[in-house]
Image (cartoon, rainbow, N blue to C red):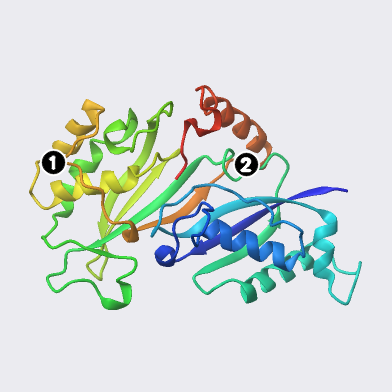
Amino acid sequence: MIVVRLRLDLGYDGSGFSGWARQPGLRTVQGEIEQALGRILRLAEPPVLTVAGRTDAGVHARGQVAHVDLVDEALAELDGNRPGQLSVDERLSALVRRLGGVLAPDVRVFRVSVAPEGFDARFSAMSRRYAYRVSDAVGGVDPLRRQEVVWHNRPLDLGALNAAAARLLGEHDFAAFCKKREGATTIRELQRLDWVREESGVLVATVVADAFCHSMVRALVGSLLAAGDGRRPVEWPGQVLAKAVRDSGVHVAPAHGLCLEEVSYPPVAELAARASATRRVRTLSVLGDAALEDQ
């Protein structure tokens, strides 16, 4: 038997999910897709997905990436009434169509492809890009966008938001903005954090880092909103960061404003090396692979 690693590019509306990770008795993105794959491929047990970033309950994604390892015999199930006649690309196209028919409308697999050698959806990733959307409109959020845009009931100053954000860039210990896990590192490289105001008036923060610890993006946004509406000076988020301890003044922003937009990977020739280097860093602690929580 030959094992084939498949890359899945997918998106979901997180409103109806208890996050990405499979949990007994709860509806999760991982659980839904694994069950669908097991059903379509007629597997005795659902396959296990590895994901680039494990999003929290209520968080959305339009650029999520996962991989799954399957034996080639399982893919033959996609041949239907043309056994042995479909190419790999035809089989994977058929898989995407069948997933579209089995999965609920709030989760979609856009593309399935054979992963290049050395690819690991989690460990090969170079960075994750999130967007956080918030409206300070006096009357509230457009009802048609209420599940992806958070209403902030105070006017926000774009200049103050960006001035505060600039103080957080670079490699730091983000313990002040993470939910602490024993044995886990909170050191991250925040590569980009800036705000724009769209024509609709919605403010969008773009946040890019090599990885994120639990609740980090929403805590960063929460601190910036306090600076953006004048409740705190623009220097305050940077001062909180420097202390490297959780500050009770930092309020975690609501989940539904957050969306995983993109996961970036190195060139094919560098995938295996990137995965190996990342895995070494994340297994230094006694907790092994749990040393760094991807989001």
**For the view shown, which residue lies furthest in the right direction?**
84
Q: Which residue does the numbered mark 1 point to in the structure image? A: 234
Q: Nearer the viewer, mark 2 or mark 1?
A: 1
Image quadrant assignment for residue 203: bottom left
- In this figure, what is the number of numbered marks? 2
Viewer-proximal residue, 105 or 123?
105
Relative image position of residue 172 (x, y in whole percent) = 33, 28
Viewer-proximal residue, 54 or 278?
54
Viewer-proximal residue, 59 or 180?
180
**For the view shown, which residue lies furthest in the front direction?**
25
Callout 1: helix, strand or loop? loop
Relative image position of residue 128 (x, y in whole percent) = 46, 46
Label 2 environment density (alpha carbons within 10 Å; few <14, some 14–19, many ≥20): few
Q: Which residue does the numbered mark 2 point to in the structure image? A: 267
Instruction: Please state which amino acid type lies under the numbered disc 1.
Output: Val
206 with respect to 269 (left or right): left
Callout 2: helix, strand or loop? loop
Q: For the point 22% across and 48% down, which residue is it? A: 222
84 with respect to 237 (left or right): right
Q: For the point 68% across and 63% down, which residue is it? A: 37
Q: For the point 70% across and 49% down, which residue is it? A: 115
Viewer-proximal residue, 209 or 289?
289
Label 1 environment density (alpha carbons within 10 Å; few <14, some 14–19, many ≥20): many
Choose the circle earlier in sequence order: 2 or 1.
1
Relative image position of residue 101 (x, y in whole percent) = 64, 76
**From what the image shows, is residue 90 above or below residue 269?**
below
Mark 2 and mark 1: Cα distance apart in space:
38 Å
Instruction: Please state which amino acid type lies under the numbered disc 2.
Output: Pro
**From what the image shows, is residue 206 above or below residue 152?**
above
